[in-house]
Each structure stands twice: as C-alpha cells, then as structure tokens.
Amino acid sequence: MSRRKWIAAALAAALGLAGCANNAGQGSGTSSSGGTGTPVSIMVGGLNKQIYLPFMLAQRLGFYQQQGLNVTLQDEGAGVDATTNMIAGKVDGVGGFYDHTIAMQGLGQSLESVVSMLTTPAEVELCRNEVKDQIHSPADWADRNLGVTDLGSSTDFLTQYLAQKNGVDPAKIHRVGVQSGNTLIGALQHGNVDCAMTTEPTVSTLLATGSAYILLDMRTAAATVQQLGGEYPATSLYMTTSYVDSHPDVVQKLVNAYVETLKWIQTHNGTEVADQMPADYYAGSGKDAYAKAFDNEKGIYNPTGIMPPNGPPTNLAVLQAFNPDVKGKTIDLSKTYTDKFVLAAK
C-alpha cells in the first residue's frame, strides 16, 4: 500500500472512531500526574526517547500540578499513530514532530503546534555492521530495507527525503515500520533492516553493543542544515485547532508547564536529568550512558519554546519534495503553529 493510501485509510478509520471515542486513549503505557486538576490526555510517540523528554520531565518536576492540571501521558510507538488517535478524539494532544501539522493540512485536517521543544530532529541513521562496506551514504539505499518508526511517521518523511536528495527514488527503498527502542534494536541485530533512523537513548544502546555504525547524524544544527537545508523544528505539542480554540485556558497552562521545563533543562546536566526519570528509561544503556547522551545533545532543546522562524519553511520544503499529500498544494504555514501561548507564558 502506498503511503498516501495508508495514511488516508488511517485518517478515515480515525474519523470513523471519533463518534464513540473518549479521552481515555489506548497507548502502550500510561503515566498520570495525579491530583484533582483539569484532566488532559497527551499521547507521545515514544515517551522514553530523549527527544520527547519534556513531557515526562514536566510531570516528574510537578509542573503540571502547579498549573492545576492532571495530565495523563500515553505512550505510542509512532507519532502518526498518536495523531490518528487525537483526530479520533481519544486524546487531547500529541507529543510529536511538528511536520505532522503540515502533512495533515495537506489532507484537510487543521492541527497546530502550540510550543516548540526541539530545534533539530536529533535523528541518527544507524546501519548494521554487516553492511558497512556496502552502505556509505543514502546514495547506497536502493533496494535496501530501512527502518522507520512507522509508515507516515516523521522518520518516514525524513528517510524518503534523504533518499531522494541523494539520488535514490523513494519508491526504490523498502521502508519497514520497526517502532523504537527494543523492537528497532532487534530489527537491526536480526538483519530485518539494513539501517534505521532513531534517537537517544537507543543510539547509545546500539553503539555500546558494537553492532551498528552511524551513517548520518542530525543531532546538531550544523548537521541538520547540511542534511536538510535549514533549521528543522521537531518535537512539539500539537493539537487540533478546534481544541486549541475551545480550550485556550488549558492550552495556556500546558504551555506554561513546558516553558518552565525547557528553562529547567538549560540549567541542569545529564546526571540531574537522569535522576528525575523513571529507571526503565535508561535500563538498556544504563544511567551513566543516558546522562552522557543528554549532555552530548543538550543543544537540541529549544530554550524558549518559540517556533524558529526559519524552521517551518524547511519542514515544508522537505515534505513538498516527495510527499503527494503536500506536493503541489498550497500550505498555509501560519496555521500550523502559534507562538501566542509561549509569548503569554514569558
């Protein structure tokens, strides 16, 4: 099934479920901030990934409760599946990559980011050691099995773009949904995929085993510009425009909590961050490796929460290069994000 047909089918299924959905949601794991505050449910495309650190960290630091919110965080392996659940009305918001708001506008859905948390994708393309003499860059990807979190995910977007940029027709690569964490690690180690796009702490876990090597790295601003042509804002809290318009007080409280979390990140190191997180977040690589990984990529976090002004055009250019849902369509970027809640928090 083509990506266009796949995401259209997922969207249709989501809309079909909307009438009977509720805010309970069904993630692979949940965590509640507790208390008697206003209930809010957020589904995150991989809670234990460091790229999504602010969501759990805000809970562990008590910032949700300080805002009078009872936030339930639900874990989902891929941002596109979290988006589908939100459109179905199962959750109120998604912790995922900003580019989904652009892709979904191309499908007639109005979503918007209300706070920007990452200024780079922080994604790393790892390949299994057995293909080290065969795959030196994305130019060698033709007919290869490439791991992405899921079809229609941001890693899928980026993988297709990098293939095309390096002269490989995206139709000539085989994208395989391998989720993240242990399932991705297993897919690489068992040869089910030749390369896969992932983030910390999975990167450190795989490198520590000596079973994979880095093909390309987008954990710095300079490397992101080299690979994608400009800033590429990634992690954000995005919601349907209808929810934002009808619950501005709840959105403001959420953004207040995340702006405070982003400020906290800037003044603390990896050890202090690891001390706050659940032990299973660093079970694979160990607490010290988790802390070191954070310190090495601390620059990925947006210190203000404001959308980088030059970022959205890069996201759009990437999607327009290959994505039939976006290519040739008029996309109004001003409707895909808002800074008003962040500015009010400041």
Image (cartoon, rainbow, N blue to C red):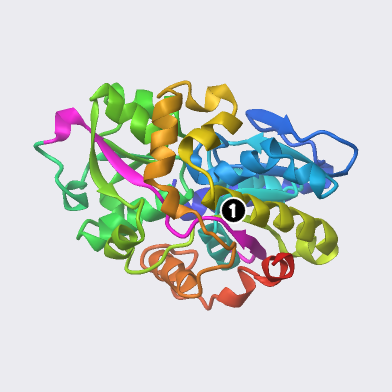
Q: Is residue 62 magenta?
A: no
Q: Is residue 118 magenta?
A: yes
| Residue closer to the observer: 295 or 30 | 295
- Amino acid identity at mark 1: Leu
Instruction: Check the picture and name the quadrant holding the N terminus.
Output: top left
Q: Pick out the residue farthest to the front.
A: 267
Going 46% across and 51% down the picture, which residue do you hit? 154
Q: Is residue 69 visible?
A: yes
Which residue is label 1 attached to? 262
Residue 158 is situated, as x and y percent measured from the top left of the image, at: 38, 54
Q: Pick out the residue farthest to the right.
A: 36
Q: Pick out the residue farthest to the left.
A: 133
In terms of image quadrants, where is residue 222?
A: bottom left
Side of 63 relative to 215 (left or right): right
Side of 337 relative to 182 (left or right): right
| Residue closer to the observer: 330 or 68 | 68
Residue 212 is situated, as x and y percent measured from the top left of the image, at: 24, 31
Assess disc 1: are there few (<14), some (14-19) or many (≥20) residues with their C-alpha within 10 Å of its C-alpha: many
Look at the picture and state if 143 lies above or below 259: above
Residue 134 is situated, as x and y percent measured from the top left of the image, at: 11, 39
Look at the picture and state if 18 lies above or below 230: above
Q: Is residue 13 visible?
A: no
| Residue closer to the observer: 106 or 241 | 241
Please report the bounds of the magenta region as a residue range.
107-132
| Residue closer to the observer: 319 or 12 | 319
Going 20% across and 47% down the picture, which residue do you hit? 142
Look at the picture and state if 277 lies above or below 219: above
Circle 1 sits in a helix, a strand or a loop, which is it? Answer: helix
Instruction: Check the picture and name the quadrant holding the C terminus.
Output: bottom right
Look at the picture and state if 89 lies above or below 245: above
Going 48% across and 49% down the picture, which residue do you hit? 152
